[in-house]
Image: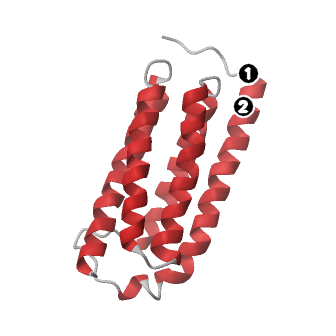
Amino acid sequence: MKSAPAQPRNIGRAVLLSILCTVIGALSADATMPEIKGWYAGLNKPWFNPPNWIFGPVWFMLYVWTALAASAAWDDRAARRTFFIILPANALWSLLFFGMHRPDLALVDVLAYLALLVVWIRQLWPQHRDHAKLQIIHLLWVSFATVLNASIWWLNK
């Protein structure tokens, strides 16, 4: 099924939502960055902990894909609502994990975030399958982050 050409209003909305998502990501980074070389460096981490530099580029792409999916599904009220719940759930994780040094509370948050992503993918799937597929990548990354979070919590109880 071919998509209709993007309307200028939709392009503007996609740009604004991309800015919103990346601003939220930047605010999350404000809580994260000061702790990378200090508190986080001192934690016991599992063998599969990726290098720190990988998180920024991956999250940037996920934020853009999330914004594009939200823009495409804008007229779907339930999907739009879920998108606006996902954003603070995402930002809260950084504040809990890095800002408050509470991997336990961050784990609770990321589990809720995972559930929201599943709901959102199901909402997107019928009419916005390509965007839903990109959100599956988002889900896989957050699933990995959940295992990493749980491992860090366990290793540092």
Tell me if residue 1 comes above or below residue 46 in the rendering. above
Q: Which residue is mark 2?
A: 11
Tell me if residue 89 comes above or below residue 51 in the rendering. above
Q: Which mark is residue 7?
A: 1
Q: x, y percentage for residue 29?
A: 58, 69
Instruction: Tell me what residue is drawn at x 50 percent, y 48 percent.
Output: 62
As shown in the figure, which amino acid type bears the numbered disc 1? Answer: Gln
Tell me if residue 16 comes above or below residue 25 in the rendering. above
Instruction: Tell me what residue is drawn at x 26 percent, y 70 percent.
Output: 151
Instruction: Tell me what residue is drawn at x 68 percent, y 50 percent.
Output: 20
Q: Tell me if mark 2 has few (under 14), some (14-19) or many (20+) residues whose alpha carbon lies within 10 angstroms of its own.
A: some
**Residue situated in front as seen by the camera: 87 or 26:** 87
As shown in the figure, which amino acid type bears the numbered disc 2? Answer: Ile
Of all residues, the one furthest to the top in this rendering is 1
Is disc 2 placed on a helix, strand or loop?
A: helix
**Residue situated in front as seen by the camera: 80 or 137:** 80
Tell me if residue 136 comes above or below residue 2 in the rendering. below
Quadrant of the rendered image containing residue 126: top left
The count of marks equals 2
Q: Are marks 2 and 1 in contact (CB under 8 Å)?
A: yes
Q: CA distance from mark 2 to mark 1?
A: 6 Å
